[in-house]
Image (cartoon, grey):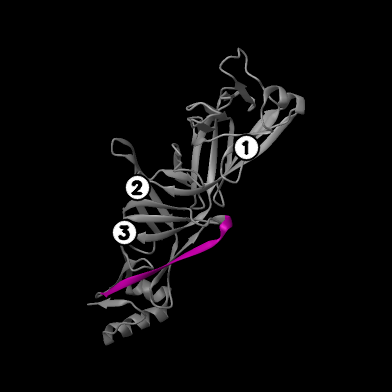
């Protein structure tokens, strides 16, 4: 028999047949199976199951989303057991989005009056869409993409954090929450800045950007990018990202940008370059590991270059005299 399903403010399932006046509130708990489907495990007596002809576990089919309050919702599909468009809202908090998992905390009070806490986990892949918004794709289901509609920032450890507010169910006050995406930056192309998520197999943020400072003097140790947020018809605005680090020379005379990620330690980005020797400067036109131009030129004065790495300075001087190519780096005159 087809039933109408809802969830009360206590995260307990309510079910009602079209002919009944009051919904049933069976004992049980929500969970998520290996196919990312929501289920409700009933904890009722055999006599109760016989009376209402309900299975021990009710599995729901539909599409996941986050509502404006960042509660987890399932929009039901149409089948013989459920009505299309019914919404099951699980009230709780996102506690983590690491290791390709969304962990969502759900609290409820059972019929015994005790507080029960469950962590529901969805298998996901994180990515950034064309509007530079953070999204996740839920695995093992039909295309089910969820956009995180709040704002993301970079914290003091140069890691991406997502911030949002929730309205407390009882207090009705706004409470701020933040999710940290631990990872490392990579320079992948002139119009793209990539954030590789730590402990994830296939999650990454490929942000569409433009270089704010195409000419860099290494004393400052920073790179600036500008990102557009939101679609053209619904533009949120621009975001300026500043990445801090120290410039060093690699063994093959490329450059290394070494960044400090706080508790996650130091992480280096190795870059190729086309090198131009001028009268008093050495100019490095940066390339990614794949050889893509980054639209960034790092300019060293001879004096600074010699003070930072005398050996690299001498090697570059020698290359300039001999007009040779060494270690895949192009010397231009």
Give the alpha-carbon distance from disc 2 to disc 1, as whole Å: 32 Å
Query: Which residue in the rendered view is the most extreme toward the left?
Result: 333
Q: Quadrant of the C terminus?
A: bottom left
- Tag 3: Cα neighbours inside 10 Å, few (<14), some, or many (≥20)? some
- Say whether marks 3 and 2 touch (CB < 8 Å): no
Horizontal arrangement in the rendering, residue 127 relative to residue 54 (left or right): left
Residue at point 58%, 14% (across, down): 19
In percent of width and height, residue 117 lies at 69, 35
Front-lying residue, 173 or 66: 66
Magenta extent:
263-277
Query: Could you say which quadrant of the image residue 186 lies in?
Result: bottom left
Q: Earlier in the sequence, mark 3 or mark 1?
A: 1
Q: For mark 2, give the secondary structure.
A: strand
In percent of width and height, residue 193 lies at 38, 55
- Say whether marks 3 and 1 touch (CB < 8 Å): no
Mark 2, residue position: 227
Front-lying residue, 202 or 281: 202
Q: Mark number for residue 105? A: 1
In percent of width and height, residue 247 lies at 42, 66
Give the alpha-carbon distance from disc 3 to disc 1, as whole Å: 40 Å
Mark 3, residue position: 190
Residue at point 37%, 57% (across, down): 223
Residue at point 28%, 78% (across, down): 331
Q: For mark 1, give the secondary structure.
A: strand
In percent of width and height, residue 221 lies at 41, 61
Q: Is residue 36 above or below residue 210?
A: above
Q: For mark 3, give the secondary structure.
A: loop
Front-lying residue, 93 or 25: 25
Q: Earlier in the sequence, mark 2 or mark 1?
A: 1
């Amino acid at each position: 028999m087809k039933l109408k399903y809802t969830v009360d403010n206590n995260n307990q399932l309510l079910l009602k047949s079209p002919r009944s006046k009051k919904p049933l509130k069976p004992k049980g708990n929500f969970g998520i199976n290996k196919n990312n489907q929501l289920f409700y495990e009933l904890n009722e007596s055999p006599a109760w199951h016989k009376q209402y002809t309900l299975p021990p576990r009710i599995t729901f089919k539909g599409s996941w989303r986050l509502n404006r309050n960042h509660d987890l919702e399932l929009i039901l599909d149409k089948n013989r057991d459920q009505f299309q468009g019914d919404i099951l809202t699980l009230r709780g908090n996102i506690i983590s989005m690491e290791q390709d998992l969304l962990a969502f905390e759900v609290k409820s009070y059972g019929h015994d009056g005790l507080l029960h806490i469950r962590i529901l986990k969805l298998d996901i892949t994180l990515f950034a869409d064309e509007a530079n918004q953070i999204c996740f794709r839920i695995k093992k289901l039909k295309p089910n993409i969820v956009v995180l509609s709040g704002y993301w920032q970079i914290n003091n450890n140069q890691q991406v954090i997502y911030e949002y507010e929730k309205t407390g169910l009882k207090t009705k006050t706004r409470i701020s929450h933040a999710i940290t995406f631990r990872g490392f930056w990579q320079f992948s192309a002139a119009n793209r800045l990539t954030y590789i998520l730590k402990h994830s197999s296939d999650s990454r943020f490929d942000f569409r950007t433009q270089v704010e400072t195409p000419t860099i003097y290494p004393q400052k140790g920073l790179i600036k990018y500008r990102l557009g947020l939101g679609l053209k018809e619904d533009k949120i605005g621009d975001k300026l990202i500043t990445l801090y680090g120290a410039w060093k020379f690699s063994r093959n005379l490329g450059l290394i940008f070494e960044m400090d990620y706080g508790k996650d330690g130091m992480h280096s980005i190795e870059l190729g370059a086309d090198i131009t020797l001028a009268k008093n400067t050495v100019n490095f036109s940066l390339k990614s590991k794949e050889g893509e131009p980054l639209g960034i030129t790092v300019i060293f004065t001879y004096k600074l270059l010699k003070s930072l790495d005398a050996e690299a300075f001498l090697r570059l001087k020698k290359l300039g005299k001999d007009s040779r190519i060494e270690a895949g780096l192009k010397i231009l005159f």
